Image (cartoon, helix red, strand yellow):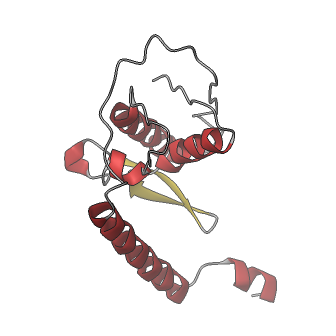
Amino acid sequence: MSLALRSTVPSRSNNLAFIAKTKVLQAIRSWQNIWNPAIRKWLPTNITTLPISAVSSSNLWVDSTAAEWILQAGKIHNLRQAIRHIDGIEIPAGGTFSFWAQIGRPRQYRGFTVGRELREGCIIPTIGGGLCQLSNALSRSYKTKRVCIFQY
């Protein structure tokens, strides 16, 4: 095996390190969500009368193999589930929005399913897979200081 190929293929130790880092970051985020009064779950308001100032658009379906089709369908289902938790919320000036505090943990009993997650260049089937597409769209709209409208 060449040195270039060996450095790009994740090993078991890389996977274990990734899992450990993920668990630590999840614990820190959970602690912050509990103890930081600025981080809260926002309730929907009647904002249908406001003008649309920006629209986020990205491809939901990508060309891939037939084996990945079910993971893409799961991703789209997960996006629909997550959007229900942010649809209609208005965050006032100075308010803090936490994606995971608003959405909650993606679990099967909450309606989330297996979708595609990209981890270290590999497609991994994960409960809640695909939610990064929504969080990235929200992050891009925040950085441009625009309101983000989603349709599902």
In-image side of 140 versus 45 (left or right): right
Residue 130, visible in the rendered structure: no
Rendering quarter of residue 28: bottom left
Q: Position of residue 95 (x, y in %)?
A: 44, 45
Residue 32 point in image, percent of width and height: 35, 66
Q: Residue at x 60, y 42 (%)?
A: 142
Residue drawn at (71%, 85%) of the image: 6
The one of 97 and 6 positioned closer to us in this rendering: 97
- Closer to the camera in the image, 145 or 8: 145
Query: Which quadrant is the C terminus positioned in?
Result: top left
Nearer to the camera, 56 or 109: 56
Q: Residue at x 42, y 31 (%)?
A: 90
Question: Residue farthest to the front?
Answer: 94
Q: Is residue 75 left or right of residue 27?
A: right
Is residue 126 shown above or below 23? above
User: Is residue 36 found left or right of 6 in the rendered image?
Assistant: left
| Residue 137, horizontal then vertical, whole percent | 59, 40
| Residue 53 % position (x, y) | 63, 21
Kindly indicate the quadrant of the structure image that contains residue 145.
top right
**Residue 111 visible to an observer of this rendering:** yes
Quarter containing the N terminus: bottom right
Residue sitting at x 80%, y 83%: 4
How many tags in the picture?
A: 0
Q: Residue furthest top?
A: 49
Q: Is residue 121 above or below residue 40?
A: below
Give 100 or 45, whichever is nearer the viewer.
45
